[in-house]
Amino acid sequence: MKIRKLLFVTKFEELCYDALNSLLALRGAALDHVIFLNVIERDKVAMKRGSGYLKEEEVKLKETANIRFIDWAENLFELGMEVGAYIEVSSLIPEILKVVGKETPDLIVIGRSHKGTLEQLYAGSDVMELVRRTDVPVLVFKHMMEDNIVPEKLFERPLFATNWSETGIKTIEYIKGMKEIIGELHVMHVVKDTALKSQDTHEVQKVRKAERKRLDDLCDELEDAGINARPHVYVGDPQKEIEKAAKEYQASMIILGSSDKAAILERWMGSISKNIADNAIFPCLLIPGDKKL
Amino acid sequence: MSKKVLVVDDDQDVRSFVVTVLEENQYIPLVAQDGIEGLETIQKEKPDLVILDVLMPRGSGIRLYRKLKTDDELSKIPVIMFTGIALRSFLKSQKVLDEFGGGEIPKPDIYLEKPVEPEELVQAIEKKLG
């Protein structure tokens, strides 16, 4: 699966041109079309007692967004890319879904605010709600350092954490679509503590060996597709271990599949992907499972 | 007989502005709000002139302009670009697309950078339609 069209959702505070610029590496894969979306929160222009609907504020916010988008679009047009833009007063997730319906992007990029609860419109539960309601992969973009430095080489060293769920195949195909731009892919599986309850060292090693074999096979498949891949088995709490591995291998992003079934049955992606998307300092690419209509 | 002028722009305020200018000057206004709708309307209505925005959803004016100028039948329709995107960026993008998209296409007849006064727009339209 190729990433040809990208939907870039921004409110300009947490996701700006530097972030977009780091995503332009995807041009090396297939990217040639970027759609900008700015959703103006309703409460910013909502009718208030004594003041009515703040039309002037809406115009101001729309024009401010338009000026930014024009500037960004000019840069992209000059690269020969196709660009579109939406500026809407609406609710975030419904508006994203609406634009996804119109534009059918291959990737949604959304920022994560580090601000307070009221400001976290784009974070946490919104991201997971989006993942639950769309088939399109979602990249939760983050500034990896406190000084807001954007990771320049986002696809240099991604870490793919697999739980062997049914979305795995879709995720692997998606990763293969990025083969031209991935430097080295780290593939990991976390064996939960509960799977190692046996007192027998031999049994514990057998579990590790079996998981390692599966990872080796997966890495062989990825290498056949032209991706340099390295397998890792970790043991413990999946969320902690994924973050640990990301730090150890200086991952440029974390890639996670997200299946509804797994979320319900195992509380794997439902909770872990949310927690990692919320808390990890790494950008997270969440690949939703196919939605059954 | 009044001439048909199509305005392709995603901004409703801009469409209203252009439609008002057109009506006041006895042209028949047609409207489309994105690149795809714009192309469909052009193919169906064969307007005498197209006033075209660049940055729009569902197909930019840059790609629509190229489609028009590389179509035997539609290439004769004059186009006024009417946009916030600078001419310099428009021309650069066309140059890149010329290189990779095959073949050079003519520059737009008239390029107006928003905002413009009604008189300037009327003047541009009259220049193309007489």
Image: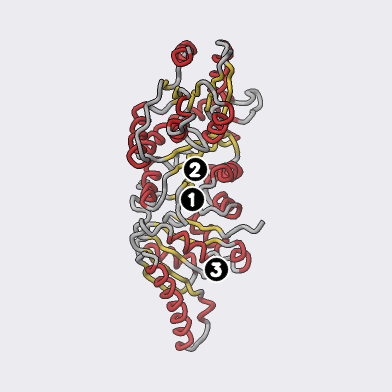
Inspect this view and state whether residue A46 appears: yes
Are dots 2 and 1 on a single chain? yes
Compare marks 3 and 1 and give the one earlier in the sequence.
Answer: 1
Q: Establish if A256 lies above or below A148.
A: below
- Parent chain of label 3: A
> Could you tell me residue B66's position as x and y percent?
43, 33
Amino acid type, residue under disc 3 in the picture: Ser
3 or 2: tag closer to the N-terminus: 2
Residue A9's tag is: 2
Residue lying at 62% horizontally and 68% vertically, measured from the top left: A265
- Left or right, A43 with respect to B81, comes to right
**Amino acid marked by disc 1:** Leu
Could you tell me which residue is drawn at 66 percent across and 26 percent down? A49
Please tell me the numbered disc located at residue A165.
Answer: 3
Residue A35 x/y as whole percent: 48, 41
Label 2 packing within 10 angstroms: few (<14), some (14-19), many (20+): many
Q: Earlier in the sequence, mark 2 or mark 1?
A: 2
Q: Amino acid at mark 2?
A: Val
Q: Quadrant of residue A13?
A: top left
State the residue in front, B104 or A82: B104
Instruction: Give x and y (percent) for residue B118.
Output: 49, 13
Disc number for residue A107:
1
Q: Which secondary structure lies at badge 2?
A: strand
Identify which residue is drawn at 49% across, 29% down. B74
Q: Position of residue A254 (x, y in %)?
A: 43, 59
- As drawn, the label of residue A8 is none
Element type at mark 3: loop
Mark 2 chain = A
